[in-house]
Image (cartoon, helix red, strand yellow):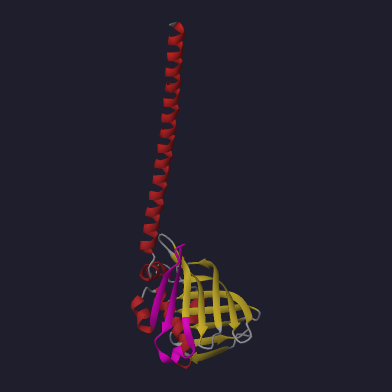
Amino acid sequence: EKLFFFIKYSINQFFLVLYVLYNKKKENAMKKGKKLLILVSLLSAASALFAAGTTMEDVCNKLAKHPITKGEFIQTKTIKATNRALKSSGEFIFSLDGIMWKTLKPFPSSMIVTTKSVIQVAADGSKTVIDVSDNQIFGSIATTLVAVFSNDVKQLKANFNTTFNDKGDGSWELILDPKDSTIASVMQTLTLGGRNYATEASIDSIVMTEASGNTIKYDFINQTYPEELTQNEKDNFGS
């Protein structure tokens, strides 16, 4: 009788241990499941929020918060026929008055493009002024950037067929196809690329694809956003 009681007790204890272990395992699985569910929910919410904010209008609105952008550029011109790449580098300014390319390498020179004129400055300081009507490509680029940085989406759509791509990793791309046949005969597309953040956006590259198939790409680095131009810069823009 004692032996029977001992065996019965042992069996009960064995099943009690199994029950405790099972419930412990079940509890851990539920905790892991809850953690996974919370993580998935957070990721889904973040993805939805990010996707909803990345539009052309949103990016232009954020870029307009910094009407002046300065930095450094690397220009790469690729000749389609020879697949040869020519590089230069220097400093740039984007502003509502126009754009300035100050090339430092391989040879120093400057080009100031406004909606009215193109000013070329040689290394010795001599200037050549060209009416923008004689160079519609540069005028188109200047007008485009002014429209982007002033959040004038209507102007962009008036001059270009626009295609905006959200790349899904925080980057965006805006492809502009000129509507004007004269410009289109020289410039096939103008592609702007950059990053989109919670409260700001940036332009990190511009690619101009010519009708011939040649491309000119500008990569922008070390960007800053001053409140205003220096007096010398204002004088260069004629403002």
Q: Which x, y percent locates residue 147?
A: 39, 77
| Occupied quadrant, residue 180 | bottom left
> What kind of secondary structure does the magenta stretch mostly adopt?
strand
Q: Is residue 41 left or right of residue 75?
A: left
| Occupied quadrant, residue 17 | top left
Q: Is residue 72 left or right of residue 153?
A: right
Q: Is residue 232 above or below residue 225?
A: below
Judged from this view, the residue extending furthest toward the right is: 106
Q: Is residue 12 above or below residue 76?
A: above
Quarter containing the C terminus = bottom left
| Occupied quadrant, residue 18 | top left
> Is 183 covered by the magenta stretch?
yes
Whether residue 238 is visible? no
Magenta span: 160-189
Q: Is residue 239 left or right of residue 152?
A: right
Q: Is residue 220 left or right of residue 21?
A: right
